[in-house]
Amino acid sequence: MSYRGKLLTADPSVLGDPYFHRSVVLIVDQTKEGHVGFILNKPLAYTLDDVMDSVGINAPLYFGGPVENENLFFIHNLGAQIKGSVAINQNLFWGGDFEKLIQKISQHDNASFFVRFFLGYAGWETDQLQAELDNGSWMVGKATEDVITETPEALWRNQLVRQGGNYLLWANTPENPFNN
């Protein structure tokens, strides 16, 4: 099964994991070597301008995952407008010509497009993601542009509400349920 373009929502049982507890991950690529994704709901305390002085764009940065967390990655909905972009689904893309992206952002104060920047990514070797899915660590859902642009703080909770059933109870529990 292809997971490219799918959202992985961490099951509430994933406690104590510093990277994936209450995470929502967008899978952006799948090859025979494994999967690449970005954690969508872990904003960092600094912006693109903080880590790249010459860019002059005050866009928020997100912790994309523990792999290559010194490298910058991005997802967007600009498609062919950004040369070298890789399709995730029909509305979302990742990577591409960074200079062109920065130029496009600089030209539009009230942008009608979506861009999110990440430091690092989440990666799984060939059978690793399937093993985590089989043991119930993740729920798989469809990634729409609306979900990707949701408030990061509410994204995990909203994904549980969409699942319904017993997940509705978990959606309202505190970060550490033992403090409830």
Image (cartoon, helix red, strand yellow):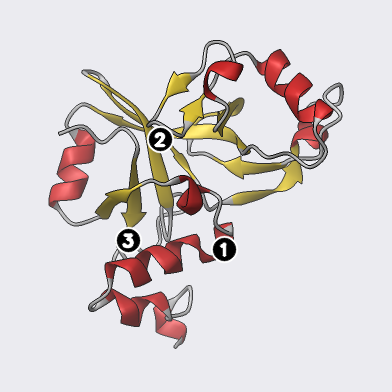
Secondary structure beneath dot 3 equals loop
The residue lying at 54 percent from left, 21 percent from top is 95
Residue 124 placement: quadrant: top left
Residue 131 placement: quadrant: top left
The residue lying at 24 percent from left, 78 percent from top is 166
Secondary structure beneath dot 1 equals helix
Hey, what amino acid is under mark 3?
Val
* Label located before the other in sequence (2 or 3): 3
Distance (Cα) linking label 3 and label 1: 17 Å
Q: Nearer the viewer, residue 173 or 74?
A: 74
Hey, what amino acid is under mark 1?
Glu
- Tell us which disc is closer to us: 2 or 3: 2
Q: Is residue 11 above or below residue 140?
A: below
* Label located before the other in sequence (3 or 1): 3
Residue 75, position as x, y percentages in the image = 54, 32
Location of mark 1 (residue): 153
Q: Nearer the viewer, residue 115 or 27?
A: 115
Location of mark 3 (residue): 14
Please state if 56 lies on the left or on the right of 26 as rendered.
right
Distance (Cα) linking label 2 and label 3: 18 Å
